[in-house]
Image (cartoon, rainbow, N blue to C red):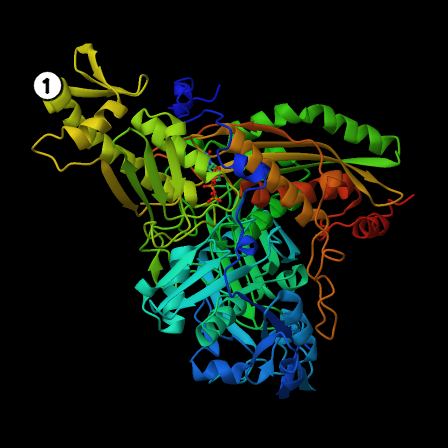
């Protein structure tokens, strides 16, 4: 029912190629308890590192005394900034070219910042030692909140920086201010809404950690670490430490979730490596949960004001947005270097809008640094939230159905490739089709009637229906546009077919649970006619894998997936010449048949040969004109990004007495182009929707006025559990990417990006007949009850 050239049509080759629901190869290891995570690694003579953290958010360090810790039997060393200074490791660059203290040298800038490190023979001794380190602080007034930080009399947090006499980091602008103003002046109607995308934490189940092992015999540093980007981390490690890059090996074993949290380098990694270098023993550092939430990369924290200009029949003419961004104590956001606000300028969304303008100001505050792409392609989540909320605000202002207003403004399916008002080149899309499918699955008309009935009957529980028809941008590069710390964002695959016909695929991306060992093998199975069980996928070891930029921003399929397909096609080309030799035919007469997966002589399908037979020929009977072996490598620099999209419809029941929100129905229709493994995609969607519900309903890293993190552990930073998650009705359409070798787009983050506005729109929709235009996330029963109360809807 979905149209388009779908490899899913080939489903049923039975070899585990594109479109087949191959069960996850990696799961045998995980469900039999044989996963190998960083904290499972034990090395002879290994020491343990515990970090001493500041209880204050803003304070000068007067003195650090580690003597009582050193007096403990099992404590081997206490490290401070002075020790690191000797090795040039007291500071490290952030991904945005700022300089962050590894251990605080002079002034603490956020609560729980790293002040000293204790190294001991076991973890408990290290912890005991850390409690005995005495630090004298001169406590200063903290600056909490970006607005407060930019006030004239705010204390200056980064006074050590030349020319920094306030807390302002940067201003950024996009679009055409003049053209947008003109459209607003001429508009029939304009609407405005202020909304906060609260500070979130990616909260992977496995926290960050590493085992650093300096080998003085080989002058080589091996770091097993929870990394989403092992090669980029190798380059950064080499640059920070001065150890030549070929003498640094990063190994990322099984990773228990990353979600953007494991993209930056954190002080703990550097301290463990420095300690291993100095003590010439392996050193393990693994965070506790509260350390992870309180100090490693947070996400979002954008205070946004959106405006739309439209005709009276709901045709959107212009969009304006102004953002105040809290970046914490260092500018450590994880964005491609040339995009200080990430891909936020995709805020025109799925709509054909004539003029757009955006501006943003970023500020330092006495909070942990961050701005990572939490299951998100660099701030696209914030952009999608803004435009999808604003469309609902406009629909209410004009008394138009939110589905109808979307339909009137969608970029038409025949307008692709499409260039947006802020300069993005959308590859393909069919937004109306996805919305229609979602409306049908949601039984939309029925619920609209039910909503009206409840209002008329003054029922205790109101119905709200929320829609989000989002567009994403995923798959960074192209390298010319996108780089991380100067390294272009291409990716890679190296495919080696063995003489016995099985193969090893090595990729530059790093799975954290997404199922790459299965789906990347499926790409090879599809392209070579090989059985998926005969392909093993390796990743995460910089000594063996080709250089890649890692996994985040749903870039694995768009970039490394493309590299894998191209590498397989190179092998297929070489296989043709071997097939010609084996079949005693001319190479130009050899054809490959996707259906059978075999090579045969044109016009004589009975004269055929499999890839297994060709592999044997490549090593045992290679044609003189070719090198022996059957291997290929591809470094893929995408010509463009891919633009997955979807329509989500959420139907909620809001209790007027308690403010509680129940999910009646949750429909998610996604389009990620051609699909590799529908079952894995479904799993990705379910997980991402759960995170979207956490975002909309529960999660928030909060601070009090003294800079204490009051939402910094799982008692206070609430994650959704199975109890809070409803059943999801998932559906899909297929609009292939025209420039991707297998027509695929990314999918991993679509549900996290697309669902929060659908959920907020639903809750607002339950109350919009009484004038409610917005409820801030997280929409706890308290917050919803207050909105009900203000609208005089409480019982
Ligand atoms: O970069 P990341 O792996 O997080 O995201 P992704 O490229 O969107 O892929 C997430 C998972 O979904 C991977 O296992 C992909 O291979 C799979 N996927 C798929 O089966 N078909 C697609 N069109 C896109 C992703």
Pick the front one: 404 or 34: 34
Quarter placement of the C terminus: top right
Left or right: 350, with 620 as reference point: right
Callout 1: few (<14), some (14-19), or many (20+) C-alpha neighbours within 10 Å? some
Residue sitting farthest toward the bottom: 62
Pick the front one: 590 or 57: 590
Query: The residue tagged with tag 1: helix, strand or loop?
Result: loop
| Residue shown at the point (60%, 56%) measured from the top left | 207
Pick the front one: 471 or 104: 104
Pick the front one: 744 or 90: 90
Residue 322 coordinates in the image, percent (x, y): 56, 61
Left or right: 607, with 789 as reference point: left
Residue sitting farthest toward the right: 795
How many numbered callouts? 1
Residue 212 coordinates in the image, percent (x, y): 47, 64
Residue 27 coordinates in the image, percent (x, y): 54, 36
Residue 444 coordinates in the image, percent (x, y): 68, 27
Judge whether 165 appears above or below 382 on screen: below
Judge whether 746 appears above or below 191 on screen: above
The residue tagged 1 is 585
Can residue 713 be seen by looking at this rendering? yes
């Amino acid at each position: 029912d979905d149209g388009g050239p779908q490899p899913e049509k080939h489903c049923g080759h039975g070899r585990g190629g594109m479109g087949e629901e191959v069960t996850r190869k990696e799961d045998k290891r995980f469900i039999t308890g044989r996963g190998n995570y960083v904290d499972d690694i034990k090395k002879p003579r290994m020491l343990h590192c515990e970090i001493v953290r500041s209880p204050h958010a803003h304070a000068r360090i007067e003195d650090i005394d580690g003597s009582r810790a050193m007096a403990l039997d099992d404590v081997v060393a206490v490290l401070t900034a002075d020790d690191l200074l000797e090795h040039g490791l007291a500071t490290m660059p952030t991904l945005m070219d700022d300089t962050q203290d590894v251990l605080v040298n002079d002034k603490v800038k956020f609560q729980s910042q790293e002040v000293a490190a204790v190294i001991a023979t076991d973890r408990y001794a290290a912890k005991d030692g850390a409690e005995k380190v005495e630090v004298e602080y001169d406590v200063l007034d903290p600056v909490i909140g970006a607005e407060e930080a930019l006030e004239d009399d705010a204390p200056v947090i980064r006074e050590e920086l030349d020319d920094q006499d306030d807390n302002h980091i940067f201003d950024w602008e996009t679009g055409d201010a003049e053209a947008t103003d003109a459209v607003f002046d001429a508009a029939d109607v304009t609407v405005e809404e202020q909304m906060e995308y609260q500070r979130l934490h990616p909260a992977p189940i496995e926290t960050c950690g590493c085992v650093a092992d300096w080998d003085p015999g080989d002058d080589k540093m091996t770091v097993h670490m929870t990394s989403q980007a092992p090669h980029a981390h190798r380059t950064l490690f080499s640059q920070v430490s001065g150890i030549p890059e070929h003498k640094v090996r990063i190994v990322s074993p099984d990773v228990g979730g990353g979600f953007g949290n494991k993209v930056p380098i954190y002080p703990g990694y550097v301290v463990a490596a420095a300690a291993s270098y100095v003590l010439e023993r392996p050193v393990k550092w693994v965070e506790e949960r509260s350390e992870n939430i309180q100090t490693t990369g947070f996400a979002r924290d954008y205070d946004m004001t959106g405006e739309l200009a439209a005709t009276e029949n709901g045709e959107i003419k212009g969009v304006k947005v102004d953002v105040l961004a809290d970046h914490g104590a260092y500018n450590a956001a994880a964005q491609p270097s040339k995009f200080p606000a990430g891909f936020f300028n995709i805020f025109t969304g799925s709509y054909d809008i004539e003029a757009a303008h955006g501006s943003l100001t970023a500020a330092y505050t006495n909070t942990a640094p961050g701005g990572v792409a939490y299951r998100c392609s660099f701030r696209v989540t914030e952009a999608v939230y803004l435009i999808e909320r604003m469309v609902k605000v406009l629909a209410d202002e004009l008394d138009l159905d939110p589905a109808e207003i979307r339909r009137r403004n969608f970029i038409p399916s025949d307008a692709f490739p499409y260039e947006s008002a802020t300069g993005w080149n959308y590859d393909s899309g069919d937004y109306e089709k996805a919305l229609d499918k979602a409306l049908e699955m949601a039984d939309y008309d029925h619920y609209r009637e039910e909503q009206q009935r409840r209002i008329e009957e003054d029922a205790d529980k109101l119905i709200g229906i929320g829609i989000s028809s989002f567009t994403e941008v995923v798959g960074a590069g192209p390298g010319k546009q996108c780089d991380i710390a100067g390294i272009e964002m291409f990716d890679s695959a190296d495919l080696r077919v063995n003489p016995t016909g099985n193969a090893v695929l090595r990729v530059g991306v790093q799975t954290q649970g997404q199922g790459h060992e299965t789906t990347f093998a499926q790409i090879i199975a599809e392209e070579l006619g090989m059985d998926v069980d005969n392909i093993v996928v390796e990743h995460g070891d910089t000594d063996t894998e080709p250089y890649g930029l890692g996994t985040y921003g749903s870039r694995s399929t768009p970039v490394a997936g493309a590299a894998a397909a191209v590498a397989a096609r190179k092998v297929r080309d070489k296989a043709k010449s071997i097939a010609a030799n084996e079949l005693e035919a001319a190479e130009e007469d050899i054809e490959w048949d996707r259906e059978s997966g075999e090579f045969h002589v044109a016009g004589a399908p009975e004269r055929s040969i499999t890839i297994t037979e060709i592999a044997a020929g490549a090593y045992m009977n290679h044609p003189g004109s070719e090198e022996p072996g059957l291997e290929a490598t591809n470094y893929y620099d995408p010509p463009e990004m891919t633009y997955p999209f979807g329509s989500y419809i959420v139907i909620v029941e809001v209790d007027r007495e308690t403010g509680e929100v129940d999910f009646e129905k949750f429909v998610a229709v996604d389009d990620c182009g051609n699909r590799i493994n529908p079952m894995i995609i479904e799993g990705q969607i379910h997980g991402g929707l759960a995170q979207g519900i956490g975002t909309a309903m529960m999660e928030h890293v909060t601070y009090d006025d003294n800079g204490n993190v009051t939402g910094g552990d799982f008692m206070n930073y609430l994650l959704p559990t199975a109890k809070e998650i409803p059943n999801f009705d998932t559906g899909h359409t297929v609009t292939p990417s025209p420039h991707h070798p297998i027509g695929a787009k990314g999918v991993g983050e679509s549900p996290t990006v697309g669902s929060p506005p659908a959920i907020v729109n639903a809750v607002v929709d339950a109350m919009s007949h009484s004038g409610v235009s917005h409820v801030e996330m997280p929409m706890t029963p308290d917050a919803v009850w207050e909105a009900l109360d203000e609208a005089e809807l409480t019982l």
